[in-house]
Image (cartoon, rainbow, N blue to C red):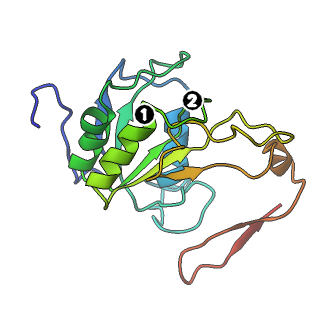
Amino acid sequence: RWSPFAPKINASNRKIVSYKADLDASDGIGGHGTHVVGSIIGSPAASADGEDAVPLAVTENNGMAPGAKVAFFDIQAGTGAGLDLPDDLEEDYFRWAYDAGARIHSNSWGDDSNEYTTTASEVDSFVYANPDMLVLIAAGNSGAADDPRGTIGSPATCKNCLAVGASQGDERDALKGEGSPILVASPPGAPEREFQ
C-alpha cells in the first residue's frame, strides 16, 4: 500500500534502507533498538586509522551480520518508558518491513504474559501468509531461575517465530570474565575467536 506519509525506501544506502519514524524520530544515547540493530548489522564505514574497514571481518565493532542492511521501525519515543506498537501489526508493522525487502525481522520487545495473545496471533498470521519471513522475538525478561514458568512472554509465545533468550540468569558474569568461555562464530576462513 502506497501512502504519501510512508518512509522512502532506498536499497542502495550502505546500511539503513528505510527509517519509519512512527513516534518522534529520535533515539537517545544507549537507545535499546539502536543497540540491538548495531549488535546485528554493525559495520563501521572506516577504521580508526582512516583505512577502509573490512566489512565482513570479525572485529569487535562488527555485528553478527555486518553485510546486512536494516529497515528500522521506531516504536519508542526518545528514551522514555513504554512502546507504541501499531494497532495492526500485520499490515502496519510487518508488511512495511517486508515491502522494504526485509526477510528477517528482529523484535527486542514483548510483555510478561506467557499466554497466547492477540499480538502473538498477529505474528503467526503474518508469518503463515509470508513463510519466507523469519520473525525473531525476545523471549522476555520476567523469568526466574527458581520458577521457569512464565519465562517466555508474548508475542514470543506464538508458533511461527524464533524466540530468543538467555540460558543464564546474569549476563554481568560474562562481562566480568566469569563462567564458561564464549565461542563466537566466524565467517568461513576466519579464525574462531574465544572470549572469557
Answer left or right for 172 relative to 117. right
Answer left or right for 78 relative to 16. right
Question: Can residue 102 be seen in this snapshot?
Answer: no
Q: Residues within 10 Å of mark 2 (few under 14, many from 20)?
A: some
Measured as percent of width and height from the top left, residue 134 is found at 40, 56
Looking at the image, tell me whether mark 2 or mark 1 is earlier in sequence order. Answer: 2
What amino acid is labelled 2 in the image?
A: Asp
Q: Which residue is mark 1?
A: 119
Marks 2 and 1 in Cβ contact (< 8 Å): yes
Measured as percent of width and height from the top left, residue 63 is found at 54, 55
Mark 1: which secondary structure? helix
Q: Residue at x 82, y 39 (%)?
A: 147
Measured as percent of width and height from the top left, residue 33 is found at 50, 35
In the image, 65 versus 106, the foreground residue is 106
**How many callouts does the rendering have?**
2
Q: Residue at x 59, y 73 (%)?
A: 186
Answer left or right for 93 relative to 54. left
Tell me the distance, in whole angstroms, between the alpha carbons under discs 2 and 1: 10 Å
Mark 2: which secondary structure? loop
In the image, 36 versus 54, the foreground residue is 36
Q: Give the quarter of the figure containing the N terminus.
A: top left
Q: Which residue is mark 2?
A: 111
Q: Which mark is residue 154?
A: none
In the image, 133 versus 170, the foreground residue is 133
Q: Relative to residue 93, is residue 4 depicted above or below?
A: above
What amino acid is labelled 1 in the image?
A: Thr
Q: Residues within 10 Å of mark 1 (few under 14, many from 20)?
A: many
Q: Relative to residue 162, is residue 195 depicted above or below?
A: below
